[in-house]
Structures are given as structure tokens and as C-alpha cells.
Image: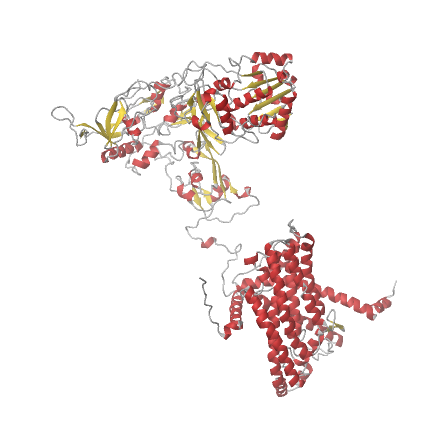
Amino acid sequence: MSAIAPSAALASSPTTEIPLINIQIDGQWMQFPKGTRLIEACKKAGKFIPHYCYHPKLSSPGNCRMCLVEIGTPKLGPDRKPLLDSEGHPLIAWNPRPAISCATEISEGLAVRTDSPLVRECRNAVMEFLLINHPLDCPICDQAGECRLQEFSVEFGKGESRFLEEKVKKPKQVDIGRHIILDDERCILCSRCIRFMQEIAKEDVLGFVKRGSYTTLTVYPGKRLDNNYSLNTVDICPVGALTSKDFRFKMRVWFLKETKSIDVNCGTGCNILIGSRENTIYRITPRENDFVNSCWMPDSHRLNFHYLMREDRLKSPKVNGLDTTWKSAISEASHLLSSHPSSKIAILASARSTLEELFLIKLIIELLGIQQHDILPRPQSGDGFLIAPDGNPNTNGARLTGVAANPPGAQLEKIVTAIRNGSVSGLLSLGEDPTKIGLTDQELQKLNFLIVLDILPNRSTAAATIVLPACGFAEKRGSMINLYGRLQRLNKAISPPGNARDDWEIYRDLLFSLNSPSTTTPRTFEELWKLMAAKLPPLAGLNFGKIGDLGFQLDLPWLEHKGPPPHSAPAPIPPKMPQNGNKSP
Amino acid sequence: MAKVIQRPKLTLAEMLYLPAILGGLLITVRHFFDTLLGRKKVTMRYPEERWDNHLPDYYRGAPALVKDEHGRERCVACQLCEFICPPRAIRIIPEEIPSNDPWAKVEKRPKEFEINMIRCIYCGLCQEVCPEQAIFLKKDYSFVGYSRQDMIHNKEKLYELGGTMTGLVHKWNEKK
Amino acid sequence: MLEPSAFLQFFHHPHVWIIWTTLAKIIVLLAIVLGLVSYTVYAERRVSAFIQDRLGPNRVGPEGLLQPIADAIKLLLKENFVPNYVKKFYYLLAPLIAMIPPILVLAVIPFGSQLFGVPMVIADLDIGILWAFAISSLGVYGIVLAGWASNSKYPFLGGIRSSSQMISYELSLGLSVVPVFLVVGTLNLQEIVRWQVHNGWLIAPFWPKGFNLHSFLANPLEHLIQTFASGFSLERLLLWIPLFLSFLVFLVSIFAETNRAPFDLPEAEQELVGGYHTEYSSMGFALFFLGEYAAMIAAAGVLVTLYLGGWSLPLIPDGSATSFLGLPFIPPWLASTLWGLINIGVFFAKVILVLLFMIWVRWTVPRFRFDQLMKLGWYVFFELALLNIILVAAILAFFPNVK
């Protein structure tokens, strides 16, 4: 007799008490909170029920019929009370008609058989129907390898077709949006994409037209699937009907190494999977994290990785425009820094750097006694969903380490003025382009020295005395604190090009070159974290491993909103009864 | 405990070595004249004499790509051969077939298809896994080059080796 | 300026004559022997191939006959790699020491009777055979030095094996030929050959004394049979037994002395990688290789001279003959030249046959174990050779007219 406690993952309202309900799954009695859908209960009990149209974050129309299970209710005695067996459990009256588990809410005494001969027969039949009109596209289909239809065909398919008639021809290669191509022949009419657009993206552009075997998914006349969340429909499409133009025919999914990381395009820090093969990133997909982004992410962010593979990436450290070794570049940099009084040096750091990097920058600031340092803030309007009103992914990290002024950006004005009037003659630009704070090329040329750490060439790297090529977000590990105080990890998916190095190693070497005392200067990433946990109170007791794949909520005193970002977790949608007819008006 | 090995007792003739040596000399000289006079043929004089006409049907030579009876490249760049290839000799870069191409409905084809013949072990798994019957192990076995780059067969070379294969796949043909 | 006649006179002056004819002999002999060395290598490869039902090198030139030239070019053009841990001076010296002795041995071997009145031996020494043994045993220094100077374990083991093997077999080698000198009574190799012309080869000394081509052509058949039968006297048969034993011991000993299979332990590939020449490449290796084959040729030359009649062949006269089969149109000088050339040809033909035999044996007999090798040398051949000397001395004492 095993009882499964309500999972901690159901954290949307952990405080309210939800009554537990007894149900029987394949002969085992278990308890689940009231309101759980049967398919979810079975999943938590370790009984996976194949499904296509059901998605935990969407409503359940119950139109694919793949999740049919056998259910039963307690046998009632003459006194309308359930009859009990010798162990005190109710006896079950099995319903001769199977029911779809995705749209069934659990009730007291409900019994389910997930793998009975009847259930298997149902699944075989549903698979056969689904495959009647499905084309033999697998060799060219991008979904192959992560296709539910393929997976369940292996498990429940017949292996041959009894269908002698002509397959229904439907439009192929339909350009329905900026990022999306639709193949209607592959569509199994699960309506996940339609429901996503209605319920999550709140832009009703997709629907079914025609009837019977000719039912076709399409965009409404005059509309296009140009929503900034459109690529999520590709993710949730269980077959290869919706494909991403960006990823289409680029690489088979089984070659991709998936690295868990986070999005760095805004303060939300959507959890992502980086799909890479041999030092090339092919796609980025959202990773489920109910504390941050649920299952979704904006298109503009997920497509913003191609710059990492640009040919003109900075590949070698440069001193005065000439390629050199890391050793000489670092020693030259430390020579310049130590030969100037700290009052004449300013640091422009980036809130796109990781917490670790910012912490090391802070160590440099403290070592040299530099007064003028700040980050470049990137306020933006946000979209009220997953694009935060801050374009920097780690503003809170910059504030926590003290690299940023309070409020961030407050010192920028002073730095610019000081450079203009010559009271500052040396600038460290660490991951930012100083021309963006209003400095002109001439003013940069006028500086005694300009040390730029970046990954791509720009106007400031052209003017720089020393260029230090660093790593992009997919090339390093580290952590960032999102706008709502969640500490999350970046992981290394690919190697940096040429001689470019991990940023934190550059700062560490610079610290050693500046004769920072070896007892308080971290040599390894682990030492760095030990030092951070000791010096930054909100990180006390933490280390890089403890952050976990889903991040760790920090209690930062200046935050008004803590916890999941507003709107990010869609409100639970009550399961609807299966309906006939389609969703189109 | 020491193990005592009983050496065989030798006869006088054996101890003298000479009869055995003479016998051996007779054997070797017989082989010498057999080979010298061509009475016995063991070795094939390779570049002049070749296996080509003696190769069995199941012989696995170099993998090559084939076109179908309409001149369509059969390969759709599904990359299954690249995946299955045990020595990782195959490297495919897929591309979309442009819409003005007569075979645009196939949608996908290899932009580059390389087989590194230094790595290839002629196992035939690529042929076995191919869902489009596009790659076959031909009977060619002799490849030489002056550099490692020469030993990488590109798409052009693979189609030249493969030629045309008719039948087997009908799904892309127009239905009557 | 000298006048032509004076010029010729100068060359006919006895001292000058000896110098330039010797120089010419040296050059011609060296050319022949070095050519023979490279083609012995070729023969080794072809014969071994045929014995093993293969074809061997048959690509370079017709039937691969230019293979030795290709090999030579390859060896010359290869990098002469000298490992940095070797004793450099001795390392470079060793191949030279291995190459020179076999060539020096050739100086005393009569490779023909005479040509234009010049004896076909470079140095007609009275102690010829002693010179041959003295010099040829220097060859071991090259191997030992190479093994030691390479400063590496396999060459070292090869060198050690080689020195002990050579020292052991030198004894039986030296002792085994003593019967020959007892019988012939001289150490001069040219004299030994002439003795064999008259008495038959020492491996089978049954030739009727004084019988030659002239008497062969002049006498009727019954007389010839009678004459031949007279060669097989009881004393000679008695003498033949120890002489044949001496031949056998000598034959086996030169196999050991030249590091040939079945006694090729110093360079046993399976155990010692390459033996004493493991660390050598390019010309260093080539010199060892050539030295080894030159030693084979020198040993074959000594064997042919001592036991197989040298340049002589029954019924073939030497270079002093003045008629060629009684043909009237051939002048005496041409006849003697022809016979002289035939003698040289006979000698080299015999050497080549002995070399082929050595190759044949190599690809027939498996390698001895080192203890077997030592046992054979010290327990069998040494005693056998000693007994043999006593036996021959006794025979000669009891039958003085057997000579």
C-alpha cells in the first residue's frame, strides 16, 4: 500500500489545503489531490499513458483518443454504500466503455487500468486511424527522432497498412508565419497549437477548416502566425506538422547534445535547452520550469544565438591591434592598470555577465580601489509575459556584487564626464561597448588605455589598447539572478572559437597578475564559489551544484516582487468535458 | 614442486640432425621449383590480375549514392547512415530543395555528402539503414590518393560511383 | 712527355707492372663482389619467396632484377637517424668495421688461374688462409661495438650473443681446416687449388693424378675407365672420411661465423627486434647488411677454394694452356685468355652455388636455441675437429704415398 503525497512541484498554490482522493491505478490504491486529471495521476504513479492532444499546460479537448483507459467506479451495495473487499477497499464495477484519461478528473474510489488488453486494443486502433493519412515523410521530417507518432507507432503500430484507398492530399510546405512552415499532411489534428495560441499567446490565429477526413489546420484568412511566441507551437506539435524555418533541415535531432541553460536576452531568464553538435548550436528550445517560464519562451530570444557562430568572433587577445598570447595580454593589462592611479581608471561592467564574473570584477575594483564603476542598464517595456522590463539578464547579480551603482546606471553620467574632461584616462569595458554610453570614437582614442573584453568586434574593440576575447553565453558556465531574484545556472554547450577564454579565468589571471593575495584569490571555480558564499550573504551556504536545474530563489532585500514572474505560469485551466465539433467559429 | 618434463628420446639419426635437415632441404627445394616453374599458383599478381570478375554478389565494396530512373537523387539527407556509421565516416550537410526545382516536393536533399574512405570499414550498415534505398555498397574496392583530402569522397564522386538504380522506391513517383 | 714505347716500357717494368695489375684486380674484384652482394640480397628474397610459394620482388625491372638498385637508392636517400643516447663515435664506426673485414679476406682468395700471365689473386700470400681467418674474425668487433654503442637493450643482447657465438665457432672453424693443410702441405691458397687440380677436390679427392684434358682426348675409352678407377685407391677412400668430416664441420662453422640461419641468433627478429642493428637506419644499416652478405661471399670463396677446387673444373686447363680444344684458328694468346676467363667464371659459379645453398638452408632450418648452439660448438664440433686432425695425421703417417 503506497500513498503518494501531493508533489512539491504543484507549487502554484502550496499554502491552500487540497483534500486527497483515493484512486486505484492498475490495482494499486493511491492518493492524489482533488482536481488532478487522471492522466497526470497515472503519470505520477509511474504509468505513462500515451497521448497527443493533451498538454499539461493547456485545456483538454480530448480529440486524439490516444489516452483511452479502462475505468471503473466503486460497486454500490443495496444501501448505496460502496462494497468493500477484505482489505477495506471498495470493490470495482468496471465500465465496459473506455474513457479518455486526459479529460477525466479523479474522483473517490475511481479505478483505472492503463495496460489491459482492451486498452492496448484501443491504442492500436487509434494509432492505425492516425496513420491512415500520414505521409511516409519520416526521412525528411525534422520531427523524426522526437516524434510522438513515431514513438507510439513502435509501441502500438501495426507495422503495415491495411488502408488500400488513396491517402487524403493536403497542403504541404505552407508558409503560415515568420518562423513557421506548416505541413498539413503530417498534422494529426490534436489542436495543441490552436489551444496554445488561444490560451497562452492570446492571439487566436490558428484553426481547423473543412470536415471529416479533410479537416485541415490553417491560419484564418488575412492572418498570419507572426506572434512572438509562435515557435512554441513547433515545440508542442507532437508530429512534424509545424516546423521552424530557422531549424528546418539543418540537423537531425538525434545528433543534438542538449545542454540545460538559461536565456540571457532579458531579466526573465527563461530556462532553455541548447541543442548543439560539434561546436555548432542548431536550436534552442524552452525547458519547463514553473517558477520561471512554464514551458514557453519568446521567439526573438530563442533565435538569438547565431551571433555565437559568426566568423568574425574575437579569437585572439590583442595588444595595440596585434595578436598576442594570453600571458602577454594579461601582463600588459595589469601593467597598465597598476601604472595608473586608481582615480584615473573607470570600469564599465555588464549586467549580461554572470554572477561569478561580476564578483571577480568586484575583487579587481576592491584591489585597485577604483571609485568609478557601473553597468549599462537596459530598461525596456517588456511584453507582460516572458519578456521582462529589463534587457539585462543579471542586473540583480550586478547589484548583489556591488559592481553596479545604486540604482544601476547612476554613475554612468559621471564616468562619461570624467572621461571627457580627462580626469579619467583609463577605461575597462568588460562585456559592453562604451560607445553605447555616449562616448565617441575620438574620446575613446584620447584615453591612455582602453581594455575591452568582448566576444564580437565593434567600435570600441577597434579603438582598444587591449582586446580580451571572451565566451558567449553557451560557451561558459556560471549563474545569473533574474529580475525576480531566482539564481539560475548557465552551462557550457560548445567551446569558444580560437583562443577565446572563459571570462572568469581572464579576471582570475588578471587578479593574480595584479598581485592579488593568493589566499583570497580563487584559483578554481569551486574556490570562487566558496569565496562568493562567504562574502555575499544571500548566497550563504550555496554552491554551484546546489543551485539545481530549476534555480534557487534568493531573498534580495531590494526586490519588490519575488518568486515566479507575473503571468508566467498560466492559471490552471479546469478540465473540460470532451466536446464534439471543432474550435473554429 | 618442480615439474619434470620428459624430453623425447632421440634416435641416432635424429641426434645427428643431418637426415632431418636433408629432408627439410628436399621439401623446400620442391616448393622452390613448383613456384619457379609455375606448377603451383597461390598468389594473384594484383594490379594486372584482379578480383573484379570473381567478386561474389554479396561483396561489400565502397559505398556510393544512386539516382533513380528519373535522375532524381535518391538521398533525402535523413542522416540515418551518418548516425549508424560505426567509424563515423559519413558527414552530411542537408539543404532544402529550392521551389523551382522539379523535385521540390521531396523538400530535402544533401548539400554535401562526404564519406571518408580512410575511416570507412565497409560494414554496409549505411545501406541497410537507408530508408530511401539511396546508398549502396558497390564492388569498387581500390581507392588511392595523395592526401587525406583525396580519400574523402564527396557527393559528386559518390554519384559517379553509384550511377542509376531503378525500382525499389516508388513513393515520390507521380500517381497515375 | 714520354714516347709511346717508353710509356709502355714504363708499364712493363716489373715493379710498376705489379702495382697497376694489382690495382686493376682490386677494382674488378670489388666491382664483381659488390654487385654479387646486392644480387645475393635479391636472390635471398626471390628464393625465399619461391620456397614459401610466393613471388617475391618482381616489380622493379624485368623479374625485379633492378630491385637491388632501387633498394640502394632508397637506403642512400633515407635519413640517417642517430638516436641521441648512443655513443656517437663508436656508433658511427661500427658499420665500417663490420663491412671492411670480409672485403679484406677476398685479397688472398685465388679467383682464377691467370690472365695475361697475371695470377688471379690479389695477394698471393704464403699464409693466405691464416690471413683469411685472422681478418674475418675482426668482423665480430663491428657487431659488438654496434651492440654496445647503441646503448639500447636489444642491440646489446645481439652484440653479446654474436661475440660468444663467433668466439665459440672460431675454434672449430680453425681446427676443421687443419687436415687440409696436413694433406696439401701448404697454407698458400693458390697452391691448395693447384693440388686439387692434380688430385681432385678435397671434398672428393679421387682424381687420377696428372690426368688432364689432353690425356682425356688422347686415350681410348677402356683406358679412361681404368685410369678413373685407379683414382679410387683404398688409401684415398680412407683419407676421404676425415676430409669430408672436416668439410662438414667447416661448412657448419661458416654458417655460424656469418650469423646465418640456423645460427642467426644475434639478429633474431622475434626476440631482439633487429638485434645489433636495431638502432641503425639508412647507410649505417645498409653497411651492416652489405657486410653480412660480403662475409657470406668471402666465406663461400674460402669454402670453394679449400674444398671445392677453387677455380678448377675437371678437364678444364688453367690459363697457361696454349691451345683451345685443339682448334687451329685460335692463337695461343687467345686460348690462354679464354681458359683464364673460364677459370674465373668457374670460381664465381661455384661461389654462387654455395651462396644459393646458404640461402636454401636459411629458409629450411629453424633457428637453434642458444644453448643448443653452444652445445653443438663446444661439445661436438670442437672435439670432432680435434679427432679429425689426429685421424688425418695417423692416416698420413701410415700411408705416406697417399699425398
Q: In the displayed image of the protein, which residue is found farthest to the left?
A: A78
Q: Percent position (x, y) of residue A300? A: 45, 21
* Coloration of the structure image: secondary structure
Instruction: Work out whether C130 lies above or below B110.
Output: below
Q: What is the quadrant of the N terminus of chain C in the image?
A: bottom right
**Residue C72 visible from this viewpoint:** no
Q: Percent position (x, y) of residue C397? A: 66, 84
Q: Is residue C71 left or right of residue B25?
A: right
Q: Percent position (x, y) of residue C396? A: 65, 83
Instruction: Work out whether A327 lies above or below A223.
Output: below
Query: Front-most of C328 and C25?
Result: C25
**Residue A403 visible from this viewpoint:** yes
Query: Front-most of C70 and C139?
Result: C139
Q: Residue at x 58, y 18 (%)?
A: A347
Q: Residue at x 48, y 48 (%)?
A: B140
Query: Front-most of A195 and C187?
Result: C187
Residue A245: quarter of image: top left
Number of numbered discs on residues: 0
Instruction: Work out whether B57 lies above or below A553.
Output: below
Q: Percent position (x, y) of residue A285? A: 42, 26
Q: What is the quadrant of the C terminus of chain C in the image?
A: bottom right
